[in-house]
Amino acid sequence: MSAYGANPGRSGHRFSSETAQAVYKSREQCAELFGAEPENTVFTLNCTHALNFAIKGIARNGCHFVASDMEHNAAIRPIYAAAEHYGGTVTLFEALEDEEQTVWNAERAIRSDTCALVCTAASNVIGLRTPIRELAALCRRKKICFIVDAAQGAGTLDLQMSDGINILCAAGHKGLYGPMGTGLMITDGKYPLNTIIEGGTGSASESLVQPDFMPDRFESGTINTAGVIALGAGAEFVRRRGTAVILSHELDLCERFCAGARKNGKIRLYNEITRENADKYAPVVSFNIEGLNSSDGAAQLSRHGFYMRGGLHCAPLAHRKIGTLDGGTIRFSPSVFTTAQEVDLLIRELGIITR
Amino acid sequence: MTHFIRELTFIMNNMNVYIKSFTLAEKARGHLARNGFRCIIERTSGGGKGCGFNLRIWVSGREAAAEVCALLGQMGIACDIPR
């Protein structure tokens, strides 16, 4: 901001050019992480913003959407809104640890009027992963658009556009270690998308019509420049560390937490991550403390220096799936910076709370 | 991609390629630079084309220009050497 913080691509002076190049570098860094082209990598304000672009962009009259039974509101709300607007319908399929059954459930939900299958890469409540490659193959066979909500998976799961994903949406502030107010929509260019926001792009300004070229088509107005440049640094950090290394570290911590919590008879775990099932899960564990609702439990932990989210996590479908729609859960979701010692301290604190 | 290129001029020792999108211009600049061609991006808004970007490429001779066009072609950017 202090060195060259001008509006990128809007002017010809040095500061604008330098900022534009810094934004491009960030775009390249983010694109590389997912095996995408920079021009198909759109910066958004968050994953919700990206999902709205994708879902409402693909929607047509009578469009039938298919989605899993554990989608975040960031996906399911625009799906229902688009269906209502276009006179379409929505079918949810059950996602399970059994990947073959999950794909079978998805296939049974698809109809001749289905235009898109929207699926989270992993639930933000119970961490259950979906079989992305297999679902992508299914969508390819059925000739429908495959949209992935990668908010919980980006930065830990190895998600590549070459897996067959048509549109990938990600949050900048979770596993990509970027700031809040950033996100990504990455496309493979196969499905043209209508726009839901039009405006100045600093390009083709003589035209009163939104550009048809990417990424400008979806980047109207001044972008969150400082945030985007920081997001690029986060993506580069993840690329250097390696998603496999990050995932392994975080899953180890989840196993450690589950093992410790299991010994405490007053902690209820809703998804137990063990060495045997770790490949089915992203590093997220939902739990509750006996006698406390999730918000009170999270508040108690916060008073002792452990900051976790309690409640429904904007994912009522997932909570309905595990029977916690009434009170929600507390979510344990370690980062690459969390240590085993911190997990042990958390277990000890839970022991004190439940004594 | 052909609509990105509106004008290609060859003057003395450089070529000018008009590109609508900064992202594509920067991608092209990097691709050319990796292949030994120095170029800069200039913002332009004249000539009835609206706002866009001029890729000024340092090149000497038609053979080099042809190589530049081939490199841009690898990115899906159509490029014709002026007669």
Image: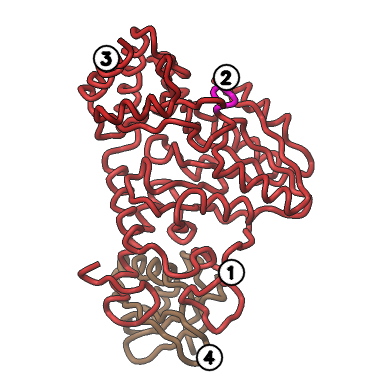
Task: Kindly report the distance in space between the C-alpha atoms of the residues bearing marks 4 and 2.
Answer: 59 Å
Image quadrant where residue A274 sits? top left
Most common secondary structure along the magenta stretch = helix
Alpha carbon of mark 1 to alpha carbon of mark 4: how far?
19 Å
Q: Earlier in the sequence, mark 1 or mark 3?
A: 1
Distance of label 4 from label 3 (alpha carbons): 73 Å
The location of residue A194, given as percent across then percent down, is 64, 61
The residue range painted magenta reads A319-324
What shade has chain B been given? brown
Residue in the image at 38% along x and 24% along y = A297
Task: Give the number of the mark in front: 1 or 3.
Answer: 3
Q: If you read the primary sequence from the N terminus, does the residue marked by circle 3 or circle 2 appear first?
A: 2
Residue A170 is situated, as x and y percent measured from the top left of the image, at 46, 46
* B63 magenta-colored: no
Question: Which label number is shown at residue A352?
Answer: 3
Is B57 above or below relative to A338?
Answer: below
Q: Which residue is mark 2?
A: A98
The picture places residue A40, in percent across and down from the top left corner, at: 49, 58
Q: Which residue is mark 1?
A: A212
